[in-house]
Amino acid sequence: MRPMHKILVVSDSHGNHGKLARIIAREYPFDCLVHCGDGVSDLFHVEVPEEVTVVRVSGNIDLARSIDMERIALFEAGSARFMVAHGDQFGVHNDYGLIEREGRNRKADAVLFGHTHIKYLRDGKPALFNPGPANSGMYGLVIVNGTPRFSHGRLED
């Protein structure tokens, strides 16, 4: 029997440490926390459980603040391969063709991204998943138990 993996996906926290901390507390326990950029340094201001794997990339706002880290990350959970990017470098405000192609080229089962501040899910290979902006209390969950299953969540204000 394969172990199940729970992945919490956030993006665009933009300095709202309070909402980010509430999202983490609400969804814990989880195995992996993915931050898709624009506020990635907010992770230093919230408590992330020690046993949680953190995957993060910088977004365009992070770069403007001289936060220099990878722009694309790859990781695996169970039998699924994920690509993480902020999305600005692929023009996701206009369409998803470039980010989809990059995910396919990198043999990803799913691409996790932000930037648009609009939650999004498109099934396929690769699946495209935007959790929506964490600074508005939005986030995503991915459950990997064989094929990844995606869902969106939102804090009650």
Image: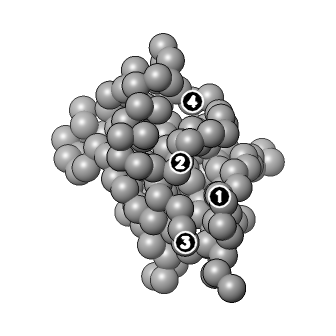
Residue 97's disc is none
Name the residue located 70 percent from the left edge and 55 percent from the top edge: 149
Amino acid type at mark 1: Pro
Q: Secondary structure at mark 1?
A: strand
Residue 146 lies, in percent from the top left, at 66, 67
Q: Secondary structure at mark 3?
A: loop
Q: Which residue is mark 4?
A: 117
Q: Which residue is mark 3?
A: 78
Question: Could you tell which of marks 2 and 3 lies nearer the N-terminus?
Answer: 3
Q: Secondary structure at mark 2?
A: strand
Question: Could you tell which of marks 1 and 2 lies nearer the N-terminus?
Answer: 2
Residue 13 lies, in percent from the top left, at 50, 44
Q: Are marks 2 and 3 in contact (CB under 8 Å)?
A: no
Name the residue located 47 percent from the left edge and 54 percent from the top edge: 82
- Distance from label 1 to label 2 (Cα)? 8 Å
Q: Considering depth in this image, is 142 or 132 the residue closer to the camera?
A: 142
Instruction: Tell me the mark number nearer the camera, choosing from 3 and 4.
Output: 3
In the displayed structure image, the side of residue 146 where residue 70 appears, left or right = left
- Distance from label 3 to label 4 (Cα)? 28 Å
Q: Considering depth in this image, is 53 or 20 the residue closer to the camera?
A: 53
In the displayed structure image, the side of residue 11 where residue 61 appears, left or right = left
Amino acid type at mark 2: Ala
Number of other residues with Cα within 10 Å of mark 4, as a class: few under 14, some 14 to 19, many 20 or more = some
- Distance from label 3 to label 1 (Cα)? 9 Å
Q: Which residue is mark 2?
A: 110
Question: Could you tell which of marks 3 and 4 lies nearer the N-terminus?
Answer: 3
Q: Which residue is mark 1?
A: 148
Q: Are marks 1 and 2 in contact (CB under 8 Å)?
A: yes
The quarter of the image holding the C terminus is: top right
Residue 34 lies, in percent from the top left, at 48, 57
